[in-house]
Amino acid sequence: MELEGRKLKILQAIIRNYLDTGEPVGSRTISKYTDLNLSPATIRNEMADLEELGYIFQPHTSAGRIPSDKGYRLYVDNMMKDKEQELKAREKEVDDMREFLNDKVDKVETLLKNMAKMLANNTDYAAMISAPQARKNKVKFIQLSQVEDHRMLCVIVLEGNIIKNKIINVKEDIDNETLLKLNILFNSSLNGLTLEEINLGIISKMNGQAGEQLEIARSVLDAVAEAISTEDNLEIYTSGATNIFKYPELSDNNKAKELISTFEEKQLLTTLIEMDNENIETGIRVYIGEETPVHTMKDCSVITATYELEEGVHGTIGIIGPKRMDYEKVVDTLKNIKDQLDSVYKKKE
Amino acid sequence: MELEGRKLKILQAIIRNYLDTGEPVGSRTISKYTDLNLSPATIRNEMADLEELGYIFQPHTSAGRIPSDKGYRLYVDNMMKDKEQELKAREKEVDDMREFLNDKVDKVETLLKNMAKMLANNTDYAAMISAPQARKNKVKFIQLSQVEDHRMLCVIVLEGNIIKNKIINVKEDIDNETLLKLNILFNSSLNGLTLEEINLGIISKMNGQAGEQLEIARSVLDAVAEAISTEDNLEIYTSGATNIFKYPELSDNNKAKELISTFEEKQLLTTLIEMDNENIETGIRVYIGEETPVHTMKDCSVITATYELEEGVHGTIGIIGPKRMDYEKVVDTLKNIKDQLDSVYKKKE
DNA sequence: TGTTAGCACTCAAATCAACGGAGTGCTAAT
DNA sequence: ATTAGCACTCCGTTGATTTGAGTGCTAACA
């Protein structure tokens, strides 16, 4: 079902125009603003065809046409041109970004929060960034220390320098020497292992060696398990949720409420991230309308990118906006940010 | 300017009614639903007086009356009765809370997040909770350890078991023995000190003793300073921002946008917290309309409470809703939660 | 055969008049 | 001092009318 050239051109013109104005576009407009030199009547015929093929539709009889999800899809897949034009604006963004990256690289959390804010501001859409997660979290370093009577502090560092802390209450304090031995034991037996590997037998092996300190060893293992499990400790930073009010088609109180709730709760956003992990190769994904895995966003389009801070440690950047978002700009910006993030740490080494 | 009893009763009736219905209340309603046995006409005269005194006003001629900020203030200060009636509903809340508190006390963060969510759900208003902060943060424990080549991990535990981590990049690694010595040095010289005290001379004193490891000592001090400074690391958890859509007077797109932005950014919310620290005695504060320190909330009422996890370690709980919120219920709920939080850790000991 | 001019038709959105109802303020009677 | 009664005000709703943008179809044209 290939489209002949002219239809394609008209479709493209319709979509472009609609992206710009947000208004249904009529035959007259197309006739005027394309180099096809066709009368409105002819355009109308073509539009009828395009409608029959499902690329566009009318919100009501006697209105202009609006791209359907299918139309957008075609546009995104085949018709987008890389925007070279707005180079200057883009340059500034890149600069802003560089600044952040040089500024505060030591604190990933702050970096990502700021990044999200910047993204939202630059695009006028809503932005989210998930903190990096290792697909297979590996333990890099463990340290148990005594903070005060009956309280131990367990610090666990994972690959990717993700740090977890846990205070452990103990009935009986242990002396320094034992503590040292325990630490060595932990590090030597858990280092470099993933959760699954730890579950497979290590526990019983350690039980043997921990000797008297079984109780503590158990607590530590629990802490490690908790730290290492990717499940619940998924941080997501969001910004610009209220940008959706800039788009009347999303500002309807109910839609707005649902969308903003989604951003506030963050729970649903995880779907976007899990999705993403499935095909990391390209790194960029575009969901249009019903395609998005988050049902509260079925009137939106969502674009996500996967970044990789270090080998195997990745997170997701996402932009959520109206279906008539500026796909080119967003894809571009995301690519950009992705590249930046991909190289922050790697370059440093 | 005391109000005679009858006027007071009428005012109270107006406010109660308005809190219930959200509609301007007319003389007929008051006449019917009070035990004063007065005709609408009489009520009207009194209402005219009350209006002149500034306690109520009409949104437009020929509409009923609405309480003004001044009216609400009088109500909150003098006319609120403790609601004993809804005991059963309240019981359930308390139970819910107990459950949380017993469940996951070890992770304050999770606890507070859940608490905020629960608050928002129970009240149908927006809720915020600030993570506990020590007015004077004291260092309790410091540990420096080597994670990998050229990377040290600095863990700092503050009073109130607030844990901070920082990765420090170093040019040259140091041997175990020196590390041990450094740790002892840090702990002995910084333990129990506040930021101000550290700034006052300790640094130079330490410089002397740190000897060769000056570079690292500096980094650690920086990390401590960062961890200890109350400024930027103020965490605030929010929930139920979208509840405001339940109240038409706040659902206007612009107001809603501003309010929700306030919740999303969180920056402005800090004002509420700082305010609160000024008078901790009572623990509960009510801001009505223009009284609130956050200008985006001038059409709302805000109620806050200060809780204290441990001696000197406190945070703020806040509820933001329409001016016609159920003050009694909210104050009650906050008192409740405050009490619970006040005793979580203290009881444990 | 593809293109176009012309025309009747449709529908959403804006404008306007009319009306009902809730509530008031005032006056005169109790 | 209280109240019944009445004229008045103003909001919100409803329905009719108009306007304008845009369409689909037909017939003429190149």
Image (cartoon, coloured by chain):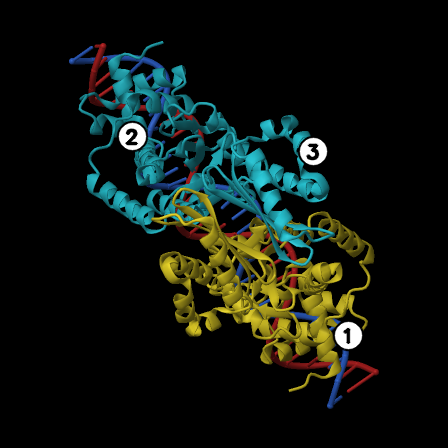
Chain colours: A yellow, B cyan, C blue, D red
Give the residue pinned by disc 1: A38
Q: State whether residue A96 is above or below residue B266.
A: below
**Residue at the image position 55 percent from the left and 30 percent from the top:** B194
Q: Type of residue at label 2? A: Arg
In this view of the protein, can residue B276 be seen by the observer? yes
Q: State whether residue A187 is above or below residue D8.
A: below
Tag 1's secondary structure? loop
Q: Nearer the viewer, mark 3 or mark 1?
A: 3
Give the residue pinned by disc 2: B16
Say which mark, if any, is on residue B208.
Answer: 3
- Residue B30, image x, y percentages: 25, 27
Q: Which chain is mark 3 on? A: B
Tag 3's secondary structure? helix
Q: Which chain is mark 1 on? A: A
Tag 2's secondary structure? helix
**Residue at the image position 37 percent from the left and 24 percent from the top:** B282
**Residue at the image position 66 percent from the left and 53 percent from the top:** B175
- Residue D25, image x, y percentages: 60, 79
Q: Nearer the viewer, mark 2 or mark 3?
A: 3
- Residue B343, image x, y percentages: 32, 36
